[in-house]
Amino acid sequence: MTASHPLRDESTPDRTAQPMNRIGSHPGPAPLAGAGRPRRPALVLVAHGSRDPRALRTVSALAERVRALRPGLSVHLGHIELNAPLLPETLAELGTGEAVLVPLLLTRGYHVKRDIPELAARTPVRARVAAPLAPHPLVVETLRDRLVEAGWPTGMDEETRRASAVVLAAAGSRDPDSKVDTQRTADLLADRLGVPVVPAYASAAAPTVSEAVRALAARGRHRTAVASCFTAPGRFATQCAEAAPWIASAPLGAHPAMARLILHRYDRARATQPLKPPALASV
């Protein structure tokens, strides 16, 4: 693992949380529950879900890493679709408690802006919805490490650098904010690697990975790697990796930096995001 970056937030201003009328009373992590001490809100990791069995194993391993970093914190997993437990089932188990929902998604889009807040609003849980994981330096740290694991050289001569580039492969969305977030992640990764990084998408947006590879080759960048900007393995990640002309990195997965980032999103949401008031608990 490379040297850690500070938890400086590189996100655009967070507009993901729905209006919920009341700001939480605790600006930072609360102490462990006990006599006279408040209980910390549960942390609910919200994964998309996938038919690929590796996806569930990956997000479960990520949840275990988060638990190890913050013992005593109640950490749960819920899926938007395809895998159990589904998010409504996870929230139902929390009753009327307080929770922070951290999307295991990389950009602002329909799931973050609409699906997750609306699912939370249908339950008695008093919820905050955190920002998506990217853009953030810890995502870039993970992307760089995954590329190195796949064969990206840690040192390049100038001739090799001029021939090299990266395609940042992402899921894609029709939401323009999603494309802004992916471009910001690409810019941060380009700064880190010192080569051009071009975003490309598996669906709903252009260019595709193959189109981005051809465009880079036309610019003399014939040594192109694909960086997998996906939380876990799945159909989109596999398709994008297959289009790589050279190396393709593994998804972000249960990298230690991702676990740290999840806790950063949890703490930041507690400090800044509205809390659904008890009056909406029966909706």
Image (spheres, rainbow, N blue to C red):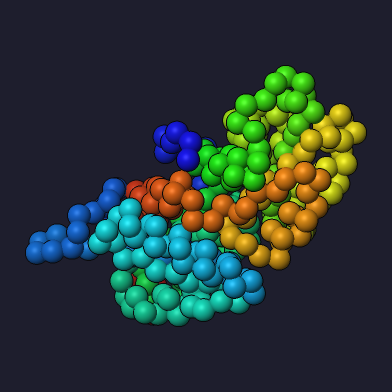
Depicted 187 relative to depicted 263: above or below = above
**Which residue is outermost to the top?**
158
In percent of width and height, residue 221 lies at 82, 32
Q: Residue at x 69, y 52 (%)?
A: 170
Q: Residue at x 83, y 42 (%)?
A: 213
Please state if 9 lies on the left or on the right of 271 as rendered.
Answer: right
In this view, the residue in front, 174 or 198, is 198
Q: Is residue 272 visible?
A: no
Q: How many marks?
A: 0
Please state if 77 lies on the left or on the right of 148 as rendered.
Answer: left
Depicted 275 relative to depicted 143: above or below = below
| Placement of the C terminus among the 4 image quadrants | bottom left
In percent of width and height, residue 123 lies at 42, 77
Depicted 184 relative to depicted 279: above or below = above
Depicted 249 relative to depicted 112: above or below = above
In percent of width and height, residue 99 lies at 36, 65
**Which residue is outermost to the left?**
35
Q: Is residue 142 visible?
A: yes
Q: Residue at x 33, y 53 (%)?
A: 69
**Which residue is outermost to the right?**
218
Q: Residue at x 20, y 54 (%)?
A: 31
In percent of width and height, residue 279 lies at 35, 72
